[in-house]
Image (spheres, grey):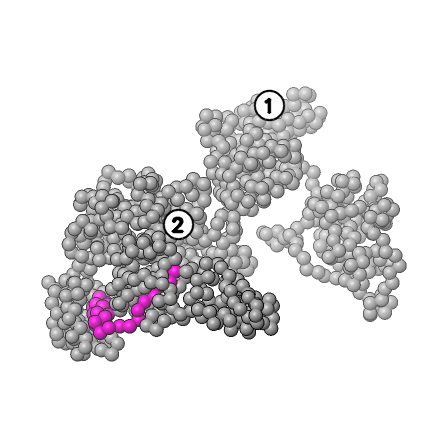
Amino acid sequence: RLILARDLIDEVIKGDPSTGSGQSYEITHVVKGQEMLDLGMHYQPLFTFLPTDKDAHYLVPGDFVSTEEGTGIVHIAPAFGAEDMEVGQEHDLPVLQTVNERGEFIDAVTPWRGVFVKQADPQITEELKNRGLLYDSGIYTHTYPFCWRCDSPLLYYARSTWFIETTRLKDQLLDNNDKINWVPDHIKHGRFGNWLENNVDWALGRERYWGTPLPIWVCDKCADMVMVSGVRELEERAGRPLDDLDLHRPYVDEVLLNCEKCDGKMHRVPELIDVWFDSGAMPVAQWHYPFENQEVFEEQFPADFICEAVDQTRGWFYSLHAESTLLFGEPCFLNCVCLGLILDEKGEKMSKSKGNVVDPWSVLDVHGADALRWYLYTASQPGESRRFSVDLVGEVVRKFLLTLWNTYSFFVTYANIDAFGPTTSEEVPVAERPALDRWVLTELHALVRHVDKSLANYDVTGAARPIQDFVDDLSNWYVRRSRRRFWKSAQDTDKAAAYQTLYEALVTLSKLMAPFMPFTSEAMYQNLVRAVDADAPASVHLADFPMYNAALIDETLSFHTRLTMGVASLGHAARNKAQIKVRQPLVAALVKTRTPAEQKALEALADQLKEELNVKELRFVDAEDLVDYEVKPVHAKLGPKYGALLPQVAEALADLPADAVVRRVEAGEPVEVHADGETLHLLPEEIQVDTVDKAGFAVAEDGGMVVGIETELTEELIREGLAREVVRRVQSLRKDADFELDDRIRTYFRASEGLASVLAEHADYIAEETLTDDFVEGVPPAGVTSGRFDIDTETITLGVERVS
C-alpha cells in the first residue's frame, strides 16, 4: 500500500509487483493533505539507530514539497538540509546526526559504521529491499554540490555556531538601503532589497585551519566568556606582552587569559570568523580604526562609491551594509555600481570545465588594455550580463579606436606639414568660424556637459557611448567635410579656424576619455599638449576635467546639421539604388521636407549637402515630383470588415486621385469611397501606399523625408567624373610610392583618346588635387611607380615621381 500524490501516480507506479509488468493499481482512498495533517498521522521510521524520546515521526506541511516530482511526501532530516532544519525548528524536532564530520556513519549505525555515506547507498538500498520496504529504486540526474578542489560530493551538515542577530536591525538595514544610489536602480528594491527583507541572522563562526579568530575566550572552570576588543586588552588579560604574536589561528590559540571571576584559565573558542565579515570590516580596517586615525576615518566614511559584480549583493555589499548599520547606524557607501556576469561570445557562462574561459592576456596582447576597458564600459548597461571574446573586443578597435586614431593622425600629419601649434596663429573667434566649425564645437561642449552629468550619476555606459558617437561624427562628417581646408596651401583664416577647431576637439576628447582609456588619452595628450607647452600639467590624468561652455552650444545649429546628415544619408542611399558612384557629379539632388522649418535648415547648410552628395544644385520639391503613388486596400484589415464588398472597395479606391489619397493618409484622416451604393470611410491604417520612382530619378525615403537624385548624366558631368577617377588613380600611386602628403610630383600618362581629352580639359583640377607640377605625356620611365587602369570604356597608364 502506497500513499502518494494523485498527480504523480503514473510517474511512480511501475507495474504489478507480482508480475513485473503492466500498470496495475487500485485507488482505495483519496484524501487531502490537510486531512492527513488533521489526523496527526504518524509513521514508523525505516531505521532507529538513534532513538528519541520525542514524538518525532509524524506528518508536517512543507512549502518546498511539490506534485511535479517525487511522490508528494518527503522525508526530512533536520541535520542535513536547510529547509529540513527550518521545519525541524518550527516543530521542535530533534536533530539526529548519524554522520560524523568526515562524512562517515557513526558507530551507532552498526551495519555501515565508518562507511562514507555515498558509498553506503547501494548497501542501504539492498537492506530496504530485503526487508520488503522498497517499492522502487533507481538513478536520476539532479544538481548536486561538489568540492571545487577535489570534486568530492559535499554533504549538508548541521553545525552549532555563533550568530550575529541581524534580524533585530532589519528595519534599520532597509532604511539605510534607501539612502544608497544603486546602479542599476532596480537592485535597490529588487535583488538587494529582497535579500534584506528576507534577512536571517548572520552565521559568523567558521571551522578552518587558518584565518581571523573569533575573539572569544571561555573559562575552563566557571565557563565565563569574554570578547576581547583588541591587542592591548589581550595583553592585559594575558599578563604579558604580545609584540610578535601572529593574530591568526592557530598561533593566537596559544594565548591563555586569566579569568577575572575565578582562578581558572580561559581558552579561545575554536571557531574563526566568516571571511565576509573581514571584507565588511574593510572601511574600518584600512585605517586601523578605532585604535588610530579617527579623524581620517570620519572624513572618509561613508564611501562615495563602490563597484563589484551583482552576485556580491549577498556577499561584500551585504557585509559592508550590515556591519556599518550595526556599528554606526548608517550606510557604508552612498553609490554602488553592480556589474553583470561576463559570458563567452555565445552568451554562455564561462567555465574551465567547458573550456570557454577567455585568457585576458590573449585580449591584452592583441588589442591592448584600452580596447578591453572600452568594450566592458559600452557593451551593456551595468547589471546586465555581457558577452566577451577576442573578436568582440576587436570590434571596438575597428569601430572606435581606429576611427579615433585616424582622426588624430590626420590632424597631426597636416599640423606638422603646416607647422601648426595652438599659439602659431591668432585665434579665430568662434562666431566668425564657418558653420561646420561651430557645429562641431556645439556637439563637443554638449558632449562634455552630458559626460560630466552621467559620471556624476555613476552612469558609465551612458557617459562612454556618446563619446563614441561624437568621434564617429567628428571623423565621418567634420573631418571629411573639412579635408580641403587642411589640404589647401593658402594659410588663411578658414584654415586656421579648421586647425583650431579640430585641435580643441581632440584635446578635449583626450581629457574626456582619460577615465575610460588611460593609455590612448595619455598618448594623445602628450603629443597635442605637453609637446608644445612644457608648463601644462605633466599628464592628462593631472589635468582638469573639461568644463562645457554653454554659450557655444547652439541647439538650432545642431538640429540643422543633424537634419543635413540625415538627408545626406538618404541621398547616398538613392545613389546606391541607381548604382552611381559618389565620385560622379550629378545635376541635382531634390528634397521633399516635412516642414518649412526643415527646408529652411537645409537651405542654410546647402553647400555642405551639395558637396557631400556631389551635386551641382539642391532643389526642394513636392513628393509627387519624385515618385508616383499606388494605393490599395489592406486586405487583412478590410477583408473581415467588408467581406464580399472588398473588390468594389478596391476598385473605388483605385479610381481616386492617388495624390489626394496619400495626403489624407499622411494627415491621419479617413478616405471616403463609394461602393454598392454605400459611402464608406477607410481609415489610414487600412490603406497601403506604395511609391514608384519617376523616370530619371532614384529616390530614398524615411519617415516622410524624401530625397531623390537626377540620374541623367550630361557629357560634361561624365567628363568631370572621369577626371575624378584619374585623381583617384594618381593618389593611389602616390600612396604606393610612399610619398609624403606635401610632396610635389611629376605625372606621366598615356591615355585613350577620350581620357586624354579629359585630362587636358581638367588638368588644373587634377594637378591641384594630386600636387602635380608637371604632366608628361608618354610611357612612364623605368623606376617610376606606375600602373595601367581601365576606367569605364577608357584606358590610361599613369606614373608618378617626386619632383626634387
Q: Main secondary structure of the magenta part?
A: helix
Given this view, does label 1 or label 2 mark the residue nearer the observer?
A: 2
- The one nearer the camera, 16 or 253, is 16
Q: Is residue 322 magenta?
A: no
Give the labeled residue for mark 2: 466
Quadrant in the picture for residue 143:
bottom right
The C terminus sits in image quarter: bottom left
Residue 237 is labelled as 1
Q: Residues within 10 Å of mark 1 (few under 14, many from 20)?
A: some
Residue at 23% across, 41% down: 533
Magenta residues, start to end = 705-732
Q: Is residue 210 left or right of residue 134?
A: left
Q: Amino acid at mark 1?
A: Arg
Quadrant in the picture for residue 703:
bottom left
Q: Is residue 134 left or right of residue 287?
A: right
Q: Position of residue 573 (x, y in %)?
A: 36, 65
Q: Can you see residue 666?
A: yes
The N terminus sits in image quarter: bottom right
